[in-house]
Amino acid sequence: MNDGPQSRIRLKFARLKEASSLTHLEQIKAFRAVAMACGLKCRPAKAGRTAVPKMSFGPAISVGYESTCEYADLYLDEFVKAETAKEKVAALDNCRFKLLEASRIPMFFPSIEAGVNAVEYLLEGGLPDGFSQGTVDRFLGLKSAVYEKVKPSGEKKSVDARPLVLEAACGPQLGALKLVLALGPGRNIKPEAVFGLIAGGPAVPERIVRKELFWFDSKGGLEVF
């Protein structure tokens, strides 16, 4: 007899402006609350803890960011169609989170956090005078771009940011910079740090939106989750 979860539903949310002040842990608590309130038969995270549903989540997001690609995998003790799960979860949309997609995925698939190789960001506003695609292209033409990263402990570490910037493009008509940055152990950099390196000095965007998560296919190409 199979006593494991019967369904794994991957939920994709938009993190709206009202949620941008939340920490990643606070966001996880909010997603768990949605799971418990949606009316689906959630798999307990641990035996005897029925109030805590078994879930897994996408990579951590920084305070201040909005997003159109926040993920939560929900494990259920019943067979549920993706359309049914979407209807029940979307009914709980609010001013902080909006459900964008719901899909059934195999139980054995790795977690999103383990599979993400790159992230796309859109940085809006705050472009310095004279900032253009030419500014971006000059940065992309560099062999290295070293910056000093300060850890929460106060320790300073020099990091070459250039290999971490997979794509960059400027849309002056939108006042926005699009960045695709590598993500992985020892391969993390904040988009605002890259913004400053490209601009050649202090540059603070007015809004940062995490747009998409990617994984590398067998040929090294980027595929959207």
Image (spheres, rainbow, N blue to C red):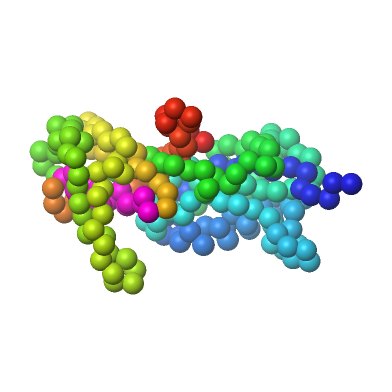
Q: Quadrant of residue 106?
A: top right
Question: Farthest right residue?
Answer: 1
Lateral position of residue 12 relative to residue 17, left or right:
right
Q: Which residues are magenta?
A: 186-199
Residue 204 in the image: above or below residue 155: above
Residue 155 in the image: above or below residue 172: below
Question: Farthest left residue?
Answer: 130
Picture coordinates of residue 8 (x, y %)?
69, 43
**Residue at x 65%, y 45% (from the top left corner):** 89
Lateral position of residue 94 relative to residue 166, left or right:
right
Picture coordinates of residue 168 (x, y %)?
27, 36
Q: Nearer the viewer, residue 210 or 14?
A: 210
**Residue at x 24%, y 50% (from the top left corner):** 160
Magenta: main secondary structure equals helix
Residue 139 seen by the camera: no
Q: Quadrant of residue 36?
A: bottom right
